[in-house]
Each structure stands twice: as structure tokens, then as C-alpha cells.
Image (spheres, grey):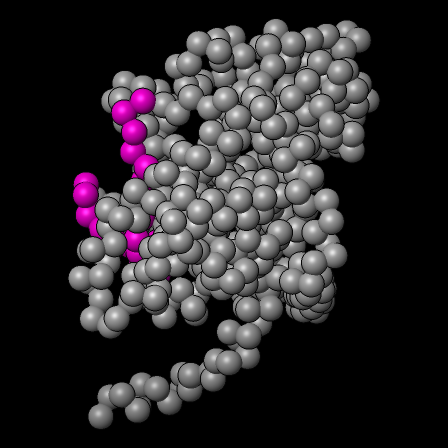
Amino acid sequence: MISLADYLRELQDISTETNQADWYADLQAGVESGRAWLDSLNAEQWTQARAILADLIRTEELKAWYGEPDGDSLFQGTSVSSLTVGAELTDPLVLNGIEDLEEAIVREYIARHHQVEPQVKAAILEDTSAWRSEGVFYGVVLGSKMLSQAFDLTMDEDHAVFRVGDVMVDPHEITSYPAEIRREYFLRSRERIQCFTGLDDLTQTELETSLVLADISKPRIERYHRRLMLAPIRCNEIAAVLSRRLTRRIAEASGGTIRPRSLMVTIYDTDTPYTYHQVTGYYGRPLSPVLPGLTVLGTSGTCNAFRWLYAYRTSLVAQKMMKSSLYSETARRFVPFVFFGVLVERDAEILLDLNRLSILRYRGNVSPYMEFCYLANRIREYLNATQPAPFPGEVELRCR
């Protein structure tokens, strides 16, 4: 089994790649520019900017609401969620390593591509043969615990709760303990948890986020009996490596008939993000807004190739389709991941950047601070491009 540490070594020298270096320069400039603009706003302007962001978030939630397929319907949603197809199985995936997960995604991608390609072809007037040869799906969204299984990110339940001094520490309540208790718990937990071996620079924040998002409810697979399933860390990095490998393997497994330029991979957790934001230091910070409902942990691609709020929308749609592990068990309907495509080729070129969906976004997990500051530039552009309507004269103009 490839460990998480070994898997991420594929990115060891990535910053020297030209595309990656160019993106990092763009990202740094974008975050700094957005932060400077936000800092320059007065109270009224700040309220306006946050209201616009709230509207954008709400729009994604509504698009996710009607983007879930209704039975066997295709093209239920719009734009980046117009083609949404889940990999529906009658038994849970049993993963003995990340290679098994990659193989399953590649197998299902190719099968679902061939399943819906005739309908995509029939639905569009223009010739889409070249576009379809790149794959009708631009990306895949999966829940975090699929990666927990693939990397065996588990520990004995009894090892998670233990006494530090006079305090019995439960990791799900980690934010309620004093700083010195949390630090000691981290140092001792690092010795007890073997699945992060090789990550010598593992931080306290990373371990705490993995523990607060850990699941007791999990697939009905014997090996997880009395095991706590930890959440993955460094999800942007996992997504970038997984994207690169899937892009290559889909082309190989299809005999070259499907050749994605790159592939979006998004990873989310079903838990609401509030405790997670407390652990990461984002909670209550005006420049780090919360996307409620679930936690977007990581995504591949630049912020322009696949926007932060698109990752939120597609994660919401995927969760509505996957439902809970207990539902899946009783209904014998397992959806380990969901594929997304667009209906119109022009949407793929305007809303996405199909050449840059495999680029490492940045290290670690998704940062709401960096994403919001980068997005702020777009909000500023929207405002600058809007010619204010002449309200005083509008009534007279229209009532004639």
C-alpha cells in the first residue's frame, strides 16, 4: 500500500515547473490585490462586498439544489453542474490502497462516458466529436473518507480518547481544551497514529483537523470495526496528484479514445465547517467566510481553472447524491464519487480552464482566506463594470 507521504512525494519538485511557478506568481499577486482592495473599503462598501459574496454563495446552493439528477435524468443542472452522473454501485468499494481507488475511478469514468456520450451528442446541434474525445466529464468529486480508506487513515477508537494530566481529552471536543493540553495531546497522538508516518512536518493544526472530522459511522466493512476513520490532510496536494494520475490512466485504459487535457478532483467532508474553522483559525475572521453545509477540503486546478464556489456547488450536489453511509447500507446503493460535465463546449472554455485542472492549487487544504481575497478581484471587476441605474428618472422613463 502506498502511504500518504509517499503519494505526495510526486509533488516534491513541482514548484520548479513553469506552469506551477506562473500560477503561484498569479495567485500571490491576486491574493495581495484582493486583500488590498478589501482593506481599502469603508464600512458601507465592506457591507456591500460581503452581501455580494453572500448572494454568490446562495446562488451556488440553489444551483446545487436543482442540479441533483431526478431519477435517470441528464442535464438537470446548469453550467458546471449540467451533466452530473454518479458511479452507483450495489456494494461498497473495498480499497486496499490508493491504486484501487484510482482504478475504480478510471473504470467508472470510461464506462459512464460511453453510457452518456450518445445522449450528449444527440442533445447538441454542433459537431462535438473533438470535444467529446477529451471526455464528457471534466472532473470528479469524492468524499474525504474514500481517501481515508485508500490510505488507511484509521486508528483504534480507544487510542483517540486518553487522559492528558487530569483531563480526559476527546478529539471531537479539542477546541474546548486549553492550549497546553492540546499541545500535549498532539505530541502524544503523533506517536500513537501510524498512518501519517513519513510526514515529518505534520503540524498540530493538521492533526487536529483530521481528528475533528473523523468518523465513527463508516462502511460496513469488517476491517473498520472499532476503528476511527480519520480525515485526510493536505487535500489540495492529494487532489493534484490524483488528477495527474487519473488523466494519464484514463487515456491509457481507453486506448487513447478518451484523452482529457486535465481533470478536476475535488474532496469534501460532510461535516459542517464550524469546528474545522475554529481549529484552523478561520472562524469569525471577516476575511475567511464560511461555506455552510459541508467542508470543502481540497481541489485541483488554479482558482481560475476551477473556482472556489464551483467546488462548493459540486460538493453539495455530490453529497445529495451520495447520502450517508447508513442510507447506502440499507438501500444497497453506494455512490463513492460523482462525475461532472458541461452541456455546452463554450461553457467548458469560458467557465473552466481545461488545460489547468491538474495544477496544484496551493499546499495544504483549501484556504477560505486566500480564496476570498482572490475572488474579491472579481467582485471589484463586477462593481466597476456596472453603470449605476438612474433611479430618480427610472419611474418617469418607464411610466409613459
Q: Residue at x 54, y 60 (%)?
A: 356
Residue 226: give x, y in percent of width and height: 52, 8
Left or right: residue 362 compared with residue 112: right
Say whether residue 349 is visible.
yes
Q: Residue at x 37, y 47 (%)?
A: 254
* 168 vs 78, nearest the viewer: 78
Can you say which quadrant of the picture contains the C terminus? bottom left
Residue 130: give x, y in percent of width and height: 34, 66
Q: Is residue 80 magenta?
A: yes
* 295 vs 116, nearest the viewer: 116
Residue 301: give x, y in percent of width and height: 55, 55
Give the magenta part as a residue range. Answer: 71-91
Give the answer, above or below, for where 130 lies relative to 145. Answer: below
What type of secondary structure mainly makes up the magenta span?
loop
Residue 101: give x, y in percent of width and height: 46, 32
Left or right: residue 224 compared with residue 161: left
Q: Residue at x 31, y 85 (%)?
A: 395
Residue furthest out toward the front: 255
Q: Is residue 271 magenta?
A: no
Q: Residue at x 63, y 48 (%)?
A: 367
Say whether residue 307 is visible.
no
